[in-house]
Amino acid sequence: MRSSPYDVIRDAPTSSFPCLKTAIFTAFAATNFFVDAGTGPDKRDLFIFDLDKMTQTFTTPYCGELRIVQSERLWFYLPVEESEVTKKPECPQQEEWSKNGWSVGYGQVCIFNFMNRSLTRKSEWACVPLQ
């Protein structure tokens, strides 16, 4: 029995992918395999694996929804501190979140390109619920 907080996903006898035990399969896009780790709307982590190369290519915290664009890019919100937000977005859900005991956090729009493994942080922000 292992004491590590990681499980191993095995795709072939010669390779393995570590990821958190709370992780669940999320999606495939081209040769990329996505694993989501987290249990609430905030403090989630995403692991991306290249199945052709049998390697982990990217890991990031995220909040909100993930979007895969044309099987080439991943669009997501990177959690940021309020002090990093240069232009605060409108947050019409704030009252509803407060009623549910949640607070408001902020996410910066980011785009990860699968082909060249580059990350672009946009000058766009959104409010997100925090538990």
Image (tube, rainbow, N blue to C red):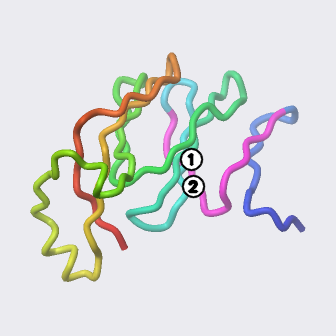
Relative to 96, 67 lies left or right: right
Asked if marks 1 and 2 touch (Cβ < 8 Å), the reply is yes
Q: Which residue: 70% across, 30% down? A: 55
Q: Which residue: 73% across, 47% down? A: 18
For mark 1, what is the residue? Answer: 35
Residue in the foreground of this view, choosing between 79 and 99: 79
For mark 2, what is the residue? Answer: 24
Q: Amino acid at mark 2?
A: Ile
Relative to 4, say whether 25 is above or below: above
The quadrant where residue 53 appears: top right
User: Which percent across, then down, holds residue 82?
Assistant: 28, 58
Q: Which residues are magenta?
A: 15-28
Q: Which mark is residue 22?
A: none
Q: Which residue: 35% across, 36% down? A: 110
User: Which percent across, then down, holds residue 111?
Assistant: 37, 31
Relative to 55, say whether 105 is above or below: below
The quadrant where residue 49 appears: top right
Residue in the foreground of this view, choosing between 76 and 22: 76
Within 10 Å of the Cα at label 2, are there few (<14), some (14-19), or many (20+) other Cα atoms?
A: some
The quadrant where residue 58 appears: top right
Q: Amino acid at mark 1?
A: Val
